[in-house]
Amino acid sequence: MNIAKNMEAIFVATLVVIGATSLATASVPKLQRAAAPAPVVTVTVQNDAAMPVVVVSAKRLTAAEKAAL
């Protein structure tokens, strides 16, 4: 019997939840918009260019030094 007495409050609460849900989901399509196409990048390869080489001239850590870290 309590449900029959409070039917108006249940109806209003349901409308509030539906309204909040519709406002929350109204902006979703804007966020899911397709991204702009990626710019076209042209790469030219030079066959006579030397490959870059990285030289590390540092001594290696000993096991005791590694353990101290």
Image (cartoon, rainbow, N blue to C red):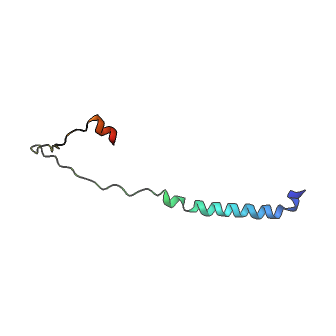
Q: Is residue 34 above or below residue 51?
A: below
Q: To which quarter of the image does residue 21 belong?
A: bottom right
Furthest residue toward top: 63
| Residue depicted at 80% across the width and 64% down the height | 9
Q: To which quarter of the image does residue 12 belong?
A: bottom right
Q: Is residue 19 left or right of residue 3?
A: left
| Residue depicted at 31% across the width and 39% down the height | 66
Percent position of residue 47, x then y:
11, 43
Furthest residue toward left: 48
Q: Is residue 33 left or right of residue 44?
A: right
Q: Is residue 51 above or below residue 22?
A: above
Image quarter in which the N terminus is found: bottom right
Percent position of residue 28, x then y:
54, 59
Image quarter in which the C terminus is found: top left
- Taking depth in this image into account, of 62 and 57 the one nearest to the observer is 62
Percent position of residue 38, x then y:
33, 55
Q: Is residue 17 above or below residue 68?
A: below
| Residue depicted at 63% across the width and 61% down the height | 22
